Image (cartoon, grey):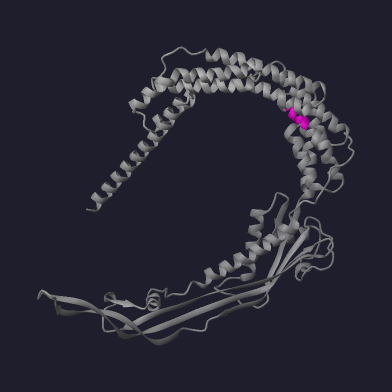
């Protein structure tokens, strides 16, 4: 019965869709009739075609389309010719293309029984004329040194007829002259980008490629000399994208990358309380989690060092490892590391009040049948509802966990604390559920109070403390990693130079 109902519903939806489509097709056909009565045959034909898209086999609509096909074609053709004769060749081209599409639809419904223009020849002629108009306009702008407008018009000519005359060369030359002007007034970066556009228009156009790479290289050199190492690396990278073999570019890139790289050593995360939860060495776990997040989120200019790598560097430079036992506050003459990270937990607490059991009372509703005789003498029964008492045991249990402390990032060469962030995170779990229900009726035969029902269905086991602490650690390490990256992994604001040697 269920399957039959689904089939009936599907058939009903399908039939409803067909009925709606038929109604919509009828409305469109009537719109076509009105347009034909007014002599607007092209609009009428379009309405009939739209109606046939909804109801393709309507012979009546096809017949109406055949009746208006030729006058509709003539109307559209006349409009296209008016545009053409009026000098609006792009408008004419648009109308001719719409006319071609219209003819295709007539052919689709077998409503084309007359000769049409040669569309390919017409498109060629009109496109040629329209492109010539755009080209003439572009030449005027080019002569007047309005290169932005010239490029726009040359591209428009190419869009109408491609390739067309020397449009690509003129576009490249427009970019080249614009870039040369930018270069002469000190807009070096824009000049380099525009030289590249010239080369993109016509490969290897003049010396545009050489000009661009020379400017990017010079910008990289400027920022390298002024201590803006990230910016230097970016500009050297732009130069490499144009010409990987340019001058001593690989060496400059390596130098800029090395100088831009910030080296962060994860020294220690001390648990001063001596307490651990769920067998975790909390300080080490937090430190590793912060390190992992920084490694996955940082830019290429951040490098992390673990404790062993730090001690190896210290040994190479004859620095006692004991210098790192406490928090480094004085400047330290050490190469290969820029910042040291220290953390301390001064609060690690787990509280378990213990399981409690409490007996509670409530009521429930049960039904029973009451016999009676109706007006015709027949035996009937009425269902009645009544309340009855019940008791159950309410069990509660919970635990709470809290960790607190602080986190610091210290600049090695100055001893300054660049980041100081407190740590505080709380977590835990609690449960409350009902067991040992005492009542006169079966649970499946009664209506329970919603609160009692919720307690009977409630979770009866506490969450694993390890999983709760892990979530807390993830929250702490997220905040610490984000603070570090916000403070350390960023490029300084820079401006391009007003003069440049290359």
User: Residue at coordinates 81% horizontally, 56% vertically from top-left?
Assistant: 335
Q: In which quarter of the image is the C terminus?
A: top right
User: Residue at coordinates 54% horizontally, 73% vertically from top-left?
Assistant: 278
User: Residue at coordinates 90% horizontally, 38% vertically from top-left?
Assistant: 499
Considering every residue shown, the one lying at the far left of the view is: 377
User: Residue at coordinates 76% horizontally, 71% vertically from top-left?
Assistant: 326
The mark tally for this picture is 0
Q: Main secondary structure of the magenta part?
A: helix
Task: Residue 164 in the image: state x and y as whole percent.
Answer: 67, 17
Task: Residue 219 in the image: state x and y as whole percent.
Answer: 83, 39
The magenta segment is 194-199
Is 120 drawn above or below residue 216 in the view shown?
A: above
Q: Quadrant of the rendered structure where residue 82 is?
A: top right
Q: Does the magenta stretch include residue 142?
A: no
Does the rendering let one see residue 184?
yes
Considering every residue shown, the one lying at the far front of the view is: 38
Task: Residue 21 in the image: state x and y as whole percent.
Answer: 37, 37
Task: Residue 48 in the image: state x and y as whole percent.
Answer: 42, 28
The answer to which of 118 and 315 lies nearer the viewer is 118
The answer to whether 400 appears left or right of 138 in the picture is left
The answer to whether 122 appears left or right of 138 in the picture is left
Q: Quadrant of the rendered structure where residue 196 is?
A: top right
The answer to which of 83 and 244 lies nearer the viewer is 83
The answer to which of 463 and 317 lies nearer the viewer is 463
Does the rendering let one see residue 47?
no
């Amino acid at each position: 019965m269920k399957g039959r109902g689904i089939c009936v519903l599907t058939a009903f939806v399908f039939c409803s869709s067909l009925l709606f489509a038929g109604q919509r097709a009828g409305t469109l056909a009537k719109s076509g009739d009105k347009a034909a009565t007014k002599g607007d045959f092209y609009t009428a034909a379009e309405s009939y075609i739209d109606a046939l898209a909804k109801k393709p086999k309507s012979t009546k609509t096809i017949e109406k389309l055949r009746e208006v096909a030729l006058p509709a074609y003539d109307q559209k053709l006349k409009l296209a010719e008016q545009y053409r004769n009026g000098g609006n060749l792009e408008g004419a081209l648009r109308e001719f293309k719409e006319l071609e599409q219209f003819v295709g639809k007539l052919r689709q419904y077998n409503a084309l029984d007359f000769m049409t223009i040669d569309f390919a020849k017409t498109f060629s002629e009109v496109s040629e004329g329209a492109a010539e108009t755009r080209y003439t306009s572009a030449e005027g702008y080019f002569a007047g040194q309005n290169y932005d407008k010239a490029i726009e018009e040359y591209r428009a000519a190419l869009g109408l007829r491609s390739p067309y005359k020397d449009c690509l060369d003129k576009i490249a030359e427009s970019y080249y002259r614009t870039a040369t002007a930018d270069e002469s007034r000190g807009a070096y970066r824009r000049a380099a980008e525009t030289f590249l556009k010239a080369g993109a228009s016509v490969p290897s156009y003049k010396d545009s490629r050489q000009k661009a790479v020379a400017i990017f290289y010079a910008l990289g050199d400027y920022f390298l000399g002024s201590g803006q190492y990230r910016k230097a690396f970016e500009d050297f990278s732009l130069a490499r994208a144009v010409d990987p073999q340019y001058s001593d570019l690989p060496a400059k890139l390596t130098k800029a990358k090395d100088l831009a790289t910030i080296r962060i050593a994860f020294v220690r995360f001390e648990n001063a309380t001596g307490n651990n939860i769920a067998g975790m060495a909390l300080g080490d776990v937090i430190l590793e989690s912060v390190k992992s997040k920084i490694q996955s989120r940082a830019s290429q200019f951040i490098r992390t060092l673990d404790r062993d790598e730090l001690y190896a560097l210290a040994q190479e430079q004859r620095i006692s490892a004991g210098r790192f036992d406490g928090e480094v506050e004085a400047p330290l003459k050490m190469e290969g590391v820029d910042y040291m990270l220290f953390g301390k937990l001064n609060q690690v607490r787990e509280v378990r009040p213990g399981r409690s059991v409490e007996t509670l009372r409530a009521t429930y509703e049960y039904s029973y049948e009451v016999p009676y005789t109706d007006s015709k003498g027949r035996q009937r029964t009425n269902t009645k509802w009544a309340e009855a008492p019940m008791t159950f045991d309410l069990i509660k249990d919970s635990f709470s966990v809290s960790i607190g402390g602080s986190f610091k990032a210290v600049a090695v060469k100055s001893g300054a604390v660049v980041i100081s962030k407190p740590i505080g995170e709380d977590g835990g779990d609690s449960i409350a559920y009902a067991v040992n229900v005492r009542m006169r009726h079966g649970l499946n035969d009664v209506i329970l109070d919603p609160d009692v029902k919720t307690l009977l269905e409630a979770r009866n086991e506490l969450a694993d403390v390890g999983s709760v602490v892990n979530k807390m650690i993830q929250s702490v390490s997220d905040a610490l990693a984000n603070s570090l990256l916000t403070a350390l992994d960023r490029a300084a604001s820079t401006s391009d130079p007003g003069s440049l040697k290359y």
